[in-house]
Image (tube, grey):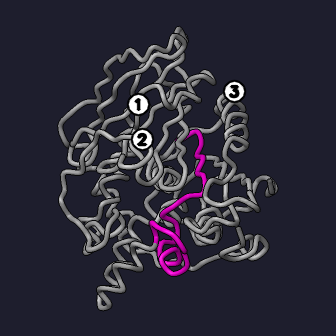
Amino acid sequence: MPLTDLTLAECLALRPDLDEPADLDAFWDRTLRTARAADGTPRFTPVDTGLTQITTYDVAVPGFAGEPVRGWLHLPAGAEGPLGCVVEFLGYGRGRGLPHEQVLWANAGHAHLVMDTRGQGWSTAGGDTPDTVSLNGDVPGFLTRGVDSPDHHYYRRVYTDAVRFVEAARAHPAVDPDRVVVTGHSQGGGISLAVAGLVPGLAGVMPDTPFLCDIRRGALIAGAPPYTEIAEYLSLHRDRTETVLTTLSYVDAALLAARATAPSLFSIAMMDDICPPSTCFAAYHRYGGAKDLRVYEFNGHEGGGGHHRREQLAWVRELFAAPRTTPVPPPRTTPDSPETPPEKRPVHAA
């Protein structure tokens, strides 16, 4: 599996100049205020999974437009006191699956809230949340759904769902609201970066080989879907390039990541042809908070796999054990400059 993008040295030196909409903050402020004003409260219904050491709840959280978004909440059985919580967003095409399938974080002693992804779940694990907005692009997939306008775009709804899931986690009596981490692989990694930029006061962020970062470049160089959906769409609609790329800039996780303040642990794979490493590094370099990085030089989109789960487990354990010394910052209203603070730790190649 050869390199399909820049070398590691080139990626470490990369500082892309991304096109940011002037009203990006206002757009998301309006979107989230509207969602919070919708009716509905989160529901948590106990589920018998047959597991004796994990207590699981079937979750429904009011997301975009108040529409119920499904998920699972896993808690260590018999745990006392508010727990640190890992909120997980899923990869492209994945749904929440069956309730016993994802219990790693609860087995580690943490609360674990898994969000279903609206309209997805047609590969590897079933989903239970329909996307009620029937805006389809001219190619299969989700990147071109509603691509004529930021207000209509599919990921506006998904990011809003994700923010509402974090808010539901913070409000749950079993969760310590000051110890909430967001994570995800691929699409889930991009969602976690977007949430980090939209929700102040998170304890941490763990994006793995994140999708939805520097989307314009991804559409130009990725050799495999989902970014190829954009190229395929624009090959049919040659006169819509700027409209499409402008719409996608409102959901570009590399732009939203610049607003984040929580500490982060990134993973990036140098032979990834699905989320090219240069696009992931665009988000890493622009990330607004403290950041740590694991690079997997000879892996594709699978990244570090179980080796990286081990890194994450140790990172979260240390994070949740540390006393909180800084207050939750207020919401940001202006973006950072393109230059991010120096990395707090050295890059680790694996």
The residue lying at 32 percent from left, 23 percent from top is 44
x, y (%) of residue 280?
60, 64
Amino acid found under the numbered disc labelled 2: Ala
Question: On the picture, is 90 further left or further right than 45?
Answer: right
Q: Disc 1 or disc 3, which is closer to the eye?
A: 1
The residue lying at 60 percent from left, 77 percent from top is 16
The residue lying at 59 percent from left, 42 percent from top is 204
Q: Disc 3 or disc 2, which is closer to the eye?
A: 2
x, y (%) of residue 349?
80, 57
The residue at which mark 1 appears reads as 98
x, y (%) of residue 272?
63, 65
The residue at which mark 3 appears reads as 321
The magenta stretch spans residue 23: no
**Counting other residues with Cα less than 10 Å from the Cα at mark 3, is it few (<14), some (14-19), or many (20 or more)?**
few
Tally of numbered tags? 3
For the N terminus, the quadrant is bottom right
Tell me whether the residue at label 3 lies in contact with that at label 2, contact meaning CB atoms closer than 8 angstroms: no
Tell me whether the residue at label 2 lies in contact with that at label 1, contact meaning CB atoms closer than 8 angstroms: yes
Q: Which residue is nearer to you in this view: 238 or 37? A: 238
Tag 2 secondary structure? loop
Tag 1 secondary structure? loop
x, y (%) of residue 51?
49, 15
The residue at which mark 2 appears reads as 125
Residues under labels 3 and 2: Cα distance? 33 Å
Q: Earlier in the sequence, mark 1 or mark 3?
A: 1
The residue lying at 39 percent from left, 37 percent from top is 167
Amino acid found under the numbered disc labelled 1: Leu
Q: Which residues are magenta?
A: 202-227
Q: Earlier in the sequence, mark 3 or mark 2?
A: 2
